[in-house]
Amino acid sequence: MSQSDSQVLGVVLIVRHGDRQGFYQDPDTYTPTATAITPLGNAEEYQLGTYLRAIYLNATSPSYIPGISTGLFNQTQVFIQADLGGEDGVVYDSCVSLTQGLWPPTTSNDITLANGTTVTAPLGGYQAFETVDPNESVSLEGFEYCNSFNTQTTDFYNSSEFQQKAAESATFLSLLPPYLDGRSVTLQNMWNIFDFMNVQSIHNAAFAKALPPTFLAQARALANWHEYNVFSSPSIDGIGNIAGQTLLPTILNGFSGIMDPTNPVKLSITAIAYKPFLSFFNMSGVAEANPQLAGIINYAAALALEVRQPSSGGEPVIRFNFKNGTDSDFITYNFLNRTGDVPLSAFIETMAPASLNTTAQWCSVCQNTQDRGCAALTLAYDQGHAAAQPRISPVGAGFLGAGLTVAVAALALGTLAFLGLLSVGKFSKRSDNKVSMTCQMQTRRSDTMPSTERVTGLVNQLDIPSQMRANI
């Protein structure tokens, strides 16, 4: 389906941060060290923002989002969040630069005082936005402190497949110590090997000159293989896809908000690191069909999931557009084993069952009773269970326990199952008295948020009831 065959109704954007300084991750748990964004990284994100502005915030563009402000930032129309976890402030700082490209300085950003003086914001009308630290969430780093994920990573390192790859790459790895400044040279440490070489190649002229021409590409190929196998599973709900499973509520809530005529938010932007891309590309089938995407994406890469209304009528569809860094433009990819745009109902039917929508679900899947709010949930459950036992019969207690442990909304129309769109990163309606934001900072603990979802098209109106709130 071409641009002229459909109209954009709204867009869910997922973007990676820009260039940064060196960064180390524990290869077993992916526990990170601190790093910082570079001026190059800020420039890359600003460039990305300018590119996205030309596509979605330009009234003459065929992909313009109808009614969205093309000048001053309108807080009621946009939802933006940024991961403030693993890579320290890099993702957040990238998000700030991205938004400055989307909403650049304008002389319209002024105010007239009581004495008649008109004051324009500095730097030619710089649009400064407040930042908000919302309810902490697992949605952007679902793999962190996930015991089940760590177990699978260990199993992968012990697998015959990994041992075979280690043997095949041993000769190449044996050539790398002179270029790694004492770092461990093992296949298990491959991501850190590649990242060090990549950062040095960008910022260290002597290193870039000394490194043999093929070494960086070879290291990247091994790192791609390593990371894709860690952050993916054959089954859509497999634990290797945890980073994508926790991102899904943000995507699904974004679609629901776009399809809700009473919700003014038609552009959702989520700034993250590379890991959820790996899982989501695997879950959506894009990586299998396009092996070049089964690996670490470039800095300032962007995924645009466009919700479109076909000109011929009927159900809204999703278009999968991806640009892998600043040197490329959007390319439209087939996904979910289909050709062309995918019906919204098909996306929901396939993806929603794998979505992890609550803190309690995450704690259960990750077998964690202590971290990211799980300890408080466990305590609350134990206290509630103990308090209920003296007053409720065994049968009644069974029903109460089920109600406290799991809240599932299962609604069907035809063959469509729209399951559990309660999100830890809600794409919400905005009101004029709400504070504006550039990049909500998503940190490490979790709080779920009840929501009512409404999707039109093939599903005219599915009202998902309020779910149990884990307000830890």
Image: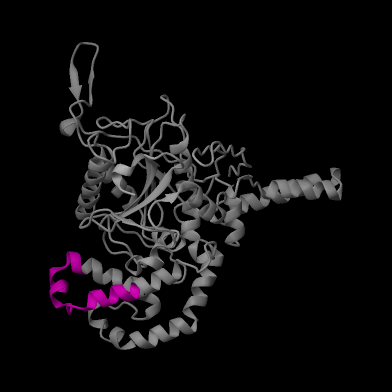
Instruction: Report if residue 457 is visible in the image.
Output: yes
Residue 259 in magenta? no
Residue at 21% over, 11% down: 115
Residue at 20% over, 52% down: 39
Q: Position of residue 368 (x, y in %)?
A: 59, 60
Indicate left or right for 359 with 74 as reference. Answer: right
Q: Position of residue 174 (x, y in %)?
A: 29, 87
Does 356 sit above or below residue 315? below
Q: Position of residue 244 (x, y in %)?
A: 46, 57
Instruction: Report if residue 83 is visible in the image.
Output: no
Q: How many marks?
A: 0
Question: On the rendered image, what quadrant is the C terminus found in?
Answer: top right
- Name the residue furthest top: 115
Does 209 sit above or below residue 369? below
Does 137 sit above or below residue 79? below
Classified by dominant secondary structure, the portion drawn in magenta counts as helix
Closer-to-camera residue (361/118): 361
Residue numbers of the magenta segment? 201-223
Indicate left or right for 249 with 105 as reference. Answer: right
Q: Position of residue 260 (x, y in %)?
A: 47, 34
- Name the residue furthest front: 312
